[in-house]
């Protein structure tokens, strides 16, 4: 489906807002589809439904995550070839088809198949929506615009928890209530499709394909005249430089400075996941049950996790424009590791007591405040920022691929670990991984705040070239 650029609206800021809202429905779908399993699993596990064991629970959950890893990688390549807008538009159709498939799945194999297909859409959206927003946003608003997607992700998870609680409490005696939980995701899928029909293509992608007139026209729709002209010149220079190189491929990352950028992108993505955040997002209801809540009480209490996530992301969106990326990420990792350490300690000290479930709930809320307020907004923003234009789709796709692979491993193993080694030891393992994450960020991640995308590219390139003979690790000092 071709995209027709519509006439410039009177207010370019309003049009930019429409673009942001339309694209971030992909984030809402990401959030709902990953969060809904949290409340659906207890009902799917019943003997008269899918009769899930801890192993098949992990299999059903991780099938989406494995699909998301592949979708993130392929989504970047498809977006580089066909365009950001068209790729996201087609992802909306895949969201809709896969959602219907999961809601009507009669058994585990069919559920796993459609969860995998849904994962392809989730992964594609997770890599392409932030990249699309980064390319559409002016430099001074890029941080806030890209992190709006994180708000929609957590908003989608909150909606999933709320609907899970309502349906689980009111219709919990109906065995197939989980099907209603899943089918609700069809609504935002339709809204994403409609929204992407009315937004333009990325001007950077258009320029990279030689469609310079269209690129300038789009820029004038979302910038004032002076900004549009200046940014168009920057884009043309970047495109000219990239045109002298071959088509983007994995071998491009053999260049030392690009290899370092890919290492950082993958590392930041992995750090996001080894915090253990998705043990709460996917299995929060089971964690609260394990600590002492009943099923219905756990479903209701789990809403607190979704609510604090949304509040924290709102704070993070405000903070990301005022604080540098590196300290924000280190503070977030310190907070998440501390919260999980306390859960591990109190799970032993208060085992079997009536206060334990409330302590665990309070600490998961603290964990999510740090995770969604600091780590979440920075992760996707940095990945969207650091790669040069020619390699942005591929580089983002590879980074998010590894995010989803680690997510898949955790999603599959968590219920097995919980049933075998218990709550305390499981969370202690995340504490150790969190400390490794702090070390990685401190040692390797550069600061990208306050630069245009083209300036970031030049900074990486020039820092390495200037010091290649004297400093084997110059990228670490980019500030």
Image: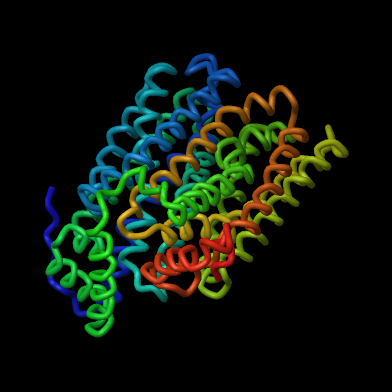
Q: Residue at x 32, y 43 (%)?
A: 75
Q: Quadrant of residue 237?
A: bottom left
Q: As drawn, which residue projects farthest toward the front? A: 469
Picture colour scheme: rainbow
Q: Residue at x 53, y 20 (%)?
A: 56
Residue 157 placement, left or right of 238? right
Q: Quadrant of residue 425?
A: top right
Q: For the C terminus, which image quadrant?
A: bottom right
Where in the figure is residue 455, as x and y percent of width and height?
40, 71
Q: In front: 93, or 77?
A: 77
How many discs mark residues in the rendered view?
0
Residue 144 seen from this side? no
Where in the figure is residue 232, as x and y percent of width and height?
24, 74
Residue 476 placement, left or right of 461? right
Q: In front: 326, or 280?
A: 326
Residue 277 placement, left or right of 194? right
Residue 279 seen from this side? yes
Q: Residue at x 75, y 26 (%)?
A: 421
Q: In front: 469, or 8?
A: 469
Where in the figure is residue 465, as x and y percent of width and height?
46, 64
Residue 199 placement, left or right of 448? left
Where in the figure is residue 297, as x and y percent of width and height?
65, 38
């Amino acid at each position: 489906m071709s995209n027709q650029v519509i006439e410039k609206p009177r207010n370019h800021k309003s049009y930019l807002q429409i673009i942001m809202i339309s694209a971030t429905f992909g984030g809402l779908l990401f959030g709902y589809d990953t969060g809904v399993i949290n409340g659906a699993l207890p009902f799917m596990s019943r003997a008269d439904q899918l009769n899930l064991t801890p192993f098949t629970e992990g299999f059903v959950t991780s099938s989406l995550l494995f699909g998301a890893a592949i979708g993130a990688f392929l989504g970047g390549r498809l977006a580089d070839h066909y365009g950001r807008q068209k790729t996201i538009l087609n992802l909306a159709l895949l969201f809709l088809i896969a959602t219907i498939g999961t809601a009507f799945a009669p058994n585990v194999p069919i559920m796993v198949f459609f969860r995998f297909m849904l994962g392809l859409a989730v992964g594609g959206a997770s890599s392409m929506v932030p990249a699309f927003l980064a390319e559409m946003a002016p430099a001074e608003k890029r941080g806030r615009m890209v992190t709006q997607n994180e708000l929609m992700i957590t908003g989608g998870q909150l909606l999933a928890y709320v609907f899970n609680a309502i349906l689980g409490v009111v219709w919990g005696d109906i065995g197939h209530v989980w099907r209603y939980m899943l089918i609700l995701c069809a609504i935002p899928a339709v809204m994403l499709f409609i929204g992407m029909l009315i937004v333009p293509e990325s001007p950077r992608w258009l320029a990279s394909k030689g469609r310079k007139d269209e690129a300038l026209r789009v820029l004038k729709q979302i910038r004032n005249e002076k900004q549009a002209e200046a940014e168009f010149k920057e884009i043309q220079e970047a495109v000219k430089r990239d045109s002298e190189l071959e088509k983007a491929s994995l071998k491009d990352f053999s260049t030392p400075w690009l290899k370092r950028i890919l290492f950082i992108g993958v590392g930041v993505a992995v750090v996001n996941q080894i915090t253990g955040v998705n043990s709460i997002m996917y299995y929060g209801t089971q964690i609260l049950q394990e600590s002492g809540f009943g099923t219905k009480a756990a479903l209701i209490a789990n809403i607190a996790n979704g609510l604090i996530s949304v509040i924290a992301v709102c704070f993070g969106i405000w903070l990301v424009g005022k604080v540098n990326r590196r300290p924000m990420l280190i503070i977030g990792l310190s907070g998440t590791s501390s919260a999980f350490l306390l859960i591990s300690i109190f799970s032993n000290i208060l085992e079997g007591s009536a206060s334990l479930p409330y302590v665990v709930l309070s600490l998961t809320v603290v964990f999510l405040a740090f995770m969604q307020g600091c780590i979440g907004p920075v992760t996707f923003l940095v990945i969207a920022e650091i790669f040069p234009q020619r390699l942005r789709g591929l580089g983002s796709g590879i980074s998010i691929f590894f995010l989803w692979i680690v997510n898949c491993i955790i999603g599959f193993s968590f219920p097995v670990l919980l049933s075998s080694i218990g709550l305390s030891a499981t969370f202690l393992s995340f504490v150790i991984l969190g400390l490794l994450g702090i070390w990685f960020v401190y040692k390797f991640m550069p600061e990208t705040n306050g630069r245009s995308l083209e300036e970031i590219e030049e900074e990486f390139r020039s820092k390495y070239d200037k010091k290649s003979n004297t400093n084997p690790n110059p990228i670490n000092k980019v500030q």
